[in-house]
Image: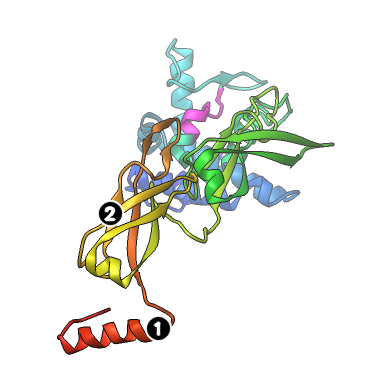
């Protein structure tokens, strides 16, 4: 039997740690993956050698036997089998016109996640190669494994009023063979960048798998009067100079269409911000919970002055007053 130097196959030293062995295997398996080298027999052979090397070196039991017995490690397995012993967990044997031989170790989805991570870019390959479509010995094909459909994102623009009260959108989606249209209800109080989920309206599943979800990604359009910051509205109100100096009241409109009366204390400086509690954006699913409305004070200067008004301002100036 030809001796195979599995350490050389993976490009690691004999003293390499399990983590180093795993990293080397992951790198080489990606580089030699058959999907990247379609029709390349040499690459396919290299891929099988890499897998065989890792199945030995990646298992502490078999690596120990390989290190101790070298080329004779498989005969050790045969002797254990002939003597009534059992193969290591996860291994199987087969007979075929010659001595017993040890086949590749069974690799399931959990082990592949351990090797490559759940976010590995070759996850589609794991589902294909180890999930049932291609057998572990590289021969024969069976039915595809059940897989959930992909989630789909679709942008949607809302006015601030629509985000405040809630809205509906009719979405046209392109499917395999035909387009389809669905109506999605957007709840009141959604924020800019929020995702509204329509369950089961995404990509179709495979092999009887569940369909994915559709997510509407909300973009709230700018408003002429109000600015949304978190759950609060911000706006500006203008009052005459006399109101800012002497005090009074002014009207503050709200997004819901009502008007509030705001009391302005005497000698209120320009830029003063007033909080009107509970007149902001509602919380999705809890409309009784609202943000606040903040009104920033602007002072409205007269565009023109009558002779009498000018005389009064000049009198104030002569008295040392500081009209705005």
Between the residue at mark 2 and the residue at mark 1, the CA separation in whole angstroms equals 28 Å
* Residue wearing tag 1: 306
Q: Is residue 241 visible?
A: yes
In the rendering, at what x and y percent does residue 2 appear?
Answer: 55, 40
Q: Quadrant of the C terminus?
A: bottom left
Residue 109 magenta: yes
Residue 254 magenta: no
Q: Is residue 304 left or right of residue 246?
A: right
Q: Is residue 121 left or right of residue 56?
A: right
Which of these two is toward me, 103 or 284?
284
Which of these two is toward me, 283 or 242?
242
Which type of secondary structure does the marked residue at label 2 adopt?
Answer: strand
In the rendering, at what x and y percent does residue 248 appear?
Answer: 28, 59
Most extreme residue toward the top, as rendered? 84
- Badge 2: residue crowd in 10 Å (few <14, some 14–19, many ≥20): few
- Badge 1: residue crowd in 10 Å (few <14, some 14–19, many ≥20): few
- Give, as a single range, the part of the protein colored magenta: 101-112
In the rendering, at what x and y percent does residue 12 appear?
Answer: 41, 52
Mark 2, mark 1: which one is toward the viewer?
1
Residue at x 67%, y 20% (from the top left corner): 97
* Residue wearing tag 2: 263
Which of these two is toward me, 37 or 121?
121
Q: Is residue 4 visible?
A: no
Residue at x 34%, y 83% (from the top left corner): 308
Most extreme residue toward the front, as rendered? 308
Q: Is residue 58 left or right of residue 218?
A: left
Nearest to N terminus: mark 2 or mark 1: 2
Above-or-below relation of 162 to 204: below
Q: Quadrant of the N terminus?
A: top right
């Amino acid at each position: 039997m030809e001796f195979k130097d599995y350490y050389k196959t993976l490009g690691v030293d004999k003293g390499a740690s399990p983590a180093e062995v795993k990293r080397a295997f992951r790198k080489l398996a990606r580089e030699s993956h058959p999907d990247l080298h379609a029709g390349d027999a040499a690459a396919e052979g290299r891929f099988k050698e890499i897998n065989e090397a890792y199945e030995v070196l990646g298992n502490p039991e078999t690596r120990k036997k390989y290190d101790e017995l070298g080329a004779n490690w498989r005969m050790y397995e045969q002797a254990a089998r002939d003597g009534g012993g059992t193969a290591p967990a996860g291994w199987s044997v087969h007979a075929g016109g010659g001595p017993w031989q040890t086949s590749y170790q069974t690799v399931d989805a959990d082990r592949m996640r351990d090797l490559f991570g759940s976010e590995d870019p070759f996850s589609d390959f794991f589902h294909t190669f180890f999930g049932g479509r291609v057998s572990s010995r590289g021969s024969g094909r069976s039915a595809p494994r059940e897989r959930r459909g992909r989630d789909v994102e679709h942008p949607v623009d809302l006015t601030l009023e629509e985000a405040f009260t809630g809205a509906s959108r009719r979405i046209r989606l392109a499917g395999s063979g035909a387009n389809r249209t669905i109506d999605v209800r957007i709840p009141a109080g959604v924020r800019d960048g929020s995702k509204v989920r329509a369950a089961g309206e995404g990509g179709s599943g495979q092999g009887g798998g569940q369909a994915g979800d559709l997510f509407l990604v909300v973009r709230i359009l700018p408003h002429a009067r109000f600015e949304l910051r978190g759950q609060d509205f911000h706006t500006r109100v203008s009052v005459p100079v006399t109101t800012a100096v002497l005090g009074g009241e002014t009207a503050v409109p709200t997004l819901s269409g009502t008007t509030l009366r705001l009391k302005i204390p005497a000698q209120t400086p320009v830029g003063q911000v007033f909080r009107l509690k509970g007149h902001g954006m509602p919380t999705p699913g809890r409309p009784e919970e609202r943000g606040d409305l903040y009104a920033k004070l602007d002072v409205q200067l007269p565009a023109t002055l009558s002779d009498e008004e000018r005389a009064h301002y000049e009198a104030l100036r002569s008295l040392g007053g500081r009209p705005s």
